[in-house]
Amino acid sequence: MKYIAQTISYVLHPMLMPLYILFFIFNNNTLFAYIPWGVKLYCYLVTVFALLIMPVISLPLFKHFRLIRSYELNDKQERVYPILVAVAFAFLGFWLLGRIGYTNIVRQLYLVLIILLSTFSVITFRWKISMHMTAIGGLCGFLLVWGMNYQGDVRNAFILFLLLSGILATSRLYLKKHTPLQVYLGFLFGLFFVFGILL
């Protein structure tokens, strides 16, 4: 059971959520599905580089300089440095995306991500809430606004990620990474924060 819970936590890791959102945007039945394939590939590559590879590479440096004790970032204070690095590379990704056309919708999402991460880092100074649940809650908030603004069919995707949110919450609680309150607050924060910004 522990292995299953850990696998779920990895598959639904916060750093992978932007890729899931990109996949939804580029494959949903809206005008964004017709963006040239080369542009889509560029967006994927920039996102993998800026929001996945570089933040992961920075973790050994943080551990070497004793800014974090483990890669699991269990202490709320240890989360601040990786989050700030993620914000910095999100800015880099935002800049790189601006170098080609057809990327305004993706750049908008990067801005939302930057604001969300910055606010999360401020909250982390005082309280600990689930980063996993904040990320998947933000994804659910994005799907709600997408369905309202672009008339896309989000019902199946929203129901899917709502169910996955419950599974992820159960996994985080089983692994004893968070209290129930931290899990619920994380999801609600991500959901309403992203919904409020994009609406």
Image (cartoon, rainbow, N blue to C red):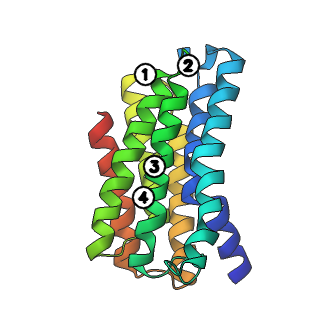
Mark whose residue sits in front, 2 or 3: 3
Residue labelled with disc 4: 84
* Quadrant position of the C terminus in the picture: top left
Q: Position of residue 142 (x, y in %)?
A: 42, 40
Q: On residue 150, which mark appears?
A: 1
Distance (Cα) linking label 1 and label 3: 30 Å
The answer to whether residue 91 is above or below residue 149 is: below
Q: Mark 2 and 1 residues: CB-CB less than 8 Å, in contact?
A: yes
Answer with mark 4 or mark 1, whichever residue precedes in sequence. 4
Q: Mark 4 and 2 residues: CB-CB less than 8 Å, in contact?
A: no
Q: Residue at x 48, y 34 (%)?
A: 94
Which type of secondary structure does the marked residue at label 1 adopt? loop
Residue labelled with disc 2: 32
> Residue flagged by tag 4: what amino acid is it?
Leu
Answer with mark 4 or mark 2, whichever residue precedes in sequence. 2
Answer with mark 1 or mark 3, whichever residue precedes in sequence. 3
Q: On residue 88, which mark appears?
A: 3
The answer to whether residue 91 is above or below residue 31 is: below
